[in-house]
Image: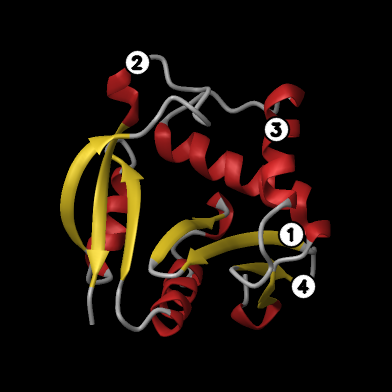
Amino acid sequence: MHRENLKTIDYRREFGLKTVKMWRLSCQRALGLQEHNRWDELSDQLAYFQDLDPALSRVTVDVRTTQVVGLLTLSGEKLDHLFVHVDYQRAGIGKTLLDEAKARSPAGLTLYTFQRNVGAQQFHLSQGFVETERGFASFDGNPWAQSKSDLADIRYEWRP
């Protein structure tokens, strides 16, 4: 993979299905879940991603394949989504997207990640975030969770 083949642009609705597939695979691998693409889950998630505000969301695209390889969604100081395609991780995409989020929110950022997502924890700590709280996400929107312990999360903050 060559960095010159990657372009970060505003999210557009036509990226919906590719974004959902990238996001699902990234989540499934990071959380150690069975990889699948059941239509009932895909359709709900596609509807969610179709409604993303392009002013708040950016994607990184591999221009050779039109594959969506990264996603950033920022709401003020809240980093809602930061995902990188599993085949493109450790190539600087996450850092590039996170640097953009820091520039767009110079007063600071907050985000949540699941405790079982050790890779994300290590990444965020390496980028200057500090853990501020532990708790539990809601079962709403997390159909993969079997118990409350699956939803254990960590809140991180970055302040310049």
Tag 3 residue: 44
Expressed as whole percent of the image width and height from the top left, the position of residue 74 reads 49, 66
Crowding around mark 4 (Cα neighbors within 10 Å: few <14, some 14 to 19, many 20+) is: few
Say which amino acid is labelled 3. Answer: Asp
Q: Is residue 15 above or below residue 102?
A: above
Q: Is residue 151 left or right of residue 80?
A: left
Expressed as whole percent of the image width and height from the top left, the position of residue 13 reads 80, 58
Q: Earlier in the sequence, mark 1 or mark 2?
A: 1
Quadrant position of residue 137: top left
Residue drawn at x 43%, y 21% as measured from the top left: 145
Crowding around mark 3 (Cα neighbors within 10 Å: few <14, some 14 to 19, many 20+) is: few
Separation of residues labelled 2 and 3 (CA atoms): 21 Å
Quadrant position of residue 70: bottom right
Front residue of 115/79: it is: 79
Q: Is residue 154 above or below residue 53?
A: above
Residue drawn at x 46%, y 67% as measured from the top left: 94
Q: Earlier in the sequence, mark 4 or mark 3?
A: 3
Q: Earlier in the sequence, mark 2 or mark 3?
A: 3
Q: Is residue 58 left or right of residue 153?
A: right
Which element type, helix, strand or loop, lies under badge 4?
loop
Say which amino acid is labelled 4. Answer: Val
Quadrant position of residue 44: top right
